Image (cartoon, helix red, strand yellow):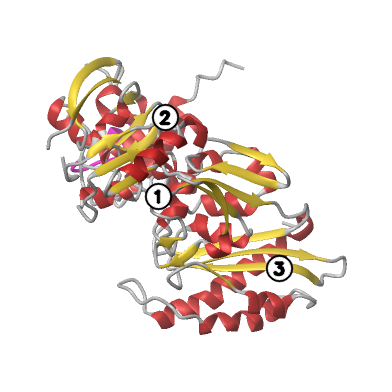
Amino acid sequence: MKPPPFSYHDPATVADAVGLLSKLENAKLLAGGQSLMPMLNMRYVLPDHIIDLNKVKELFYLREANGALVVGAMTRQRDLEFSDDVKTRHPLIQEAILNVGHRQTRNRGTVGGSLCHLDPSAEIPTVALALDATVTAAGPKGKRDIPIADFPVDYMTSAIAPDEILVEVRFPSWPKGHGHGFVEFARRHGDFAIASAAALLEEDANGKIKRVSLTIGGVAKIPLRMPAVEKSLVGQTASEEVFREACEECRKLEALTDVHAPASYRQHLATVMSRRALMAAHNRVGGRA
Amino acid sequence: MRETRNITVTINGKRYDEEVEVRFTLADFMRQQLGLTGTHLGCEHGVCGACTILFDGLSARSCLMLAVQADGHEILTVEGIAPSATELHPLQEAFRDNHGLQCGFCTPGMLTTLLEFLRDNPDPTEKEVRIAISGNLCRCTGYQGIVDAALDAAQRLKPAKPAP
């Protein structure tokens, strides 16, 4: 009986959900409930209307299309966790998912919910950025695509408009033989990451870096790609020393301070997590390790 | 404003037709309205795991669901684990025999979590067990007894091998 009083709506289609969202004042969308329900229980949010998306069947899917993993917004995190396709073709996503909360929360928690909640330390937005994902939002005027780079606007704030619903996310695949690494530092397994890093790496036959992607989560108010580090690494021969030097750049990030860690510690962790993620990716290039 | 809905839910094999306030969490509905107090509430915001139930066979935190969302679904709580009123499930026996509980507050969540885990991983390592229960807090046992119980239960749940 903890949540404040609200009216409950459970539309069956995206169109109905969008209709309700434009019609109702002070409405919140309920996806997997792993963030909104605690906020309701503690009365951090006081919505007049809850629009539950759990009956919108058209938002539950996971498929491979046009070189990308296409995921409906209500797809449960567990569906990525246990998908063979995700494991073999999108190993970065699989590795990251295992760090998302716990089994009990992944069984309910959704991909779209995590993206929209946009906690700075959340793993799904971090890998979405690393993979140059595209999200699709549906609103009263129809659908529009948002490149993930434009999706995080500010602390826990996405580019989704108040009358829009995130309906799909597409994670492009990297070619076979690429290396991946997702690492995070948290006090206990399943806790929110104090800092995390996601890396993807392609090397040529001589070990020269052809293409690299590095993203840091948990450190700043939104997850951040590190284009300066990526640029400095392309053309270099991968090694721990090369990564260490390049990742010093991460110390310059404008970092959060909270009860768990001061900014200076997060900046330090950003360099360490980045190097470890890149090393893990390097060690996996071409199916090594 | 007190909005209610009629729901039908099957809990531990028994069907309930109930009128429920839409803002009720599933945990509070089961405990307060149905008297099923085996499911415990510790933190009520999804951290402690005491309220874990199996929702259509998958573990979930019942404090993070609304009762209305259970309409038409099947739930298993700690009350439904034992085969009868006089027998314990092998997992419960393993908890008893390995000091898997002291005060018992976390136990309903530990049992439901491990029931799902051992179903999917019948032969787990100690590390896998520790990760499986990482979303369940226990303040008594230091976890060792629970880990021992889970590993013991895995052995007990294995089908008996035919004699060579």
Identify residue type, mark 3.
Answer: Val
Q: Residues within 10 Å of mark 3 (few under 14, many from 20)?
A: many
First of labels 2, 3 by sequence position:
2
The residue that disc 2 covers is: A12
Identify residue type, mark 1.
Answer: Asp
| Residue located 34% across and 21% down the image | B72
Residue stretch in magenta:
B94-103
| Nearest to the observer: residue A219 or residue A4 | A4
Is residue A151 visible in the rendered image? The answer is yes
Judged from the image, the secondary structure of the residue bearing numbered disc 1 is loop
Above-or-below relation of A96 to A195:
above
Q: Residues within 10 Å of mark 1 (few under 14, many from 20)?
A: some
Mark in the foreground, 1 or 3: 1
Identify residue type, mark 2.
Answer: Ala
Report the side of A169 relative to A36 (left or right): right
Residue A99: image x %, image y %? 49, 54
Residue A145: image x %, image y %? 58, 52
| Nearest to the observer: residue A272 or residue A29 | A29
Q: Quadrant of residue B5?
A: top left
Q: Residue furthest front?
A: A141
Question: What whole-number distance in Å separates the C-alpha atoms at marks 1 and 3?
Answer: 36 Å
Mark in the foreground, 2 or 3: 2
Q: Residue furthest right?
A: A205
The residue that disc 3 covers is: A212
Report the side of A264 relative to A274 (left or right): left
Question: What whole-number distance in Å separates the C-alpha atoms at marks 2 and 3?
Answer: 41 Å
Same chain for labels 1 and 2? Say yes or no: yes
Q: Chain of mark 3?
A: A
The residue that disc 1 covers is: A163
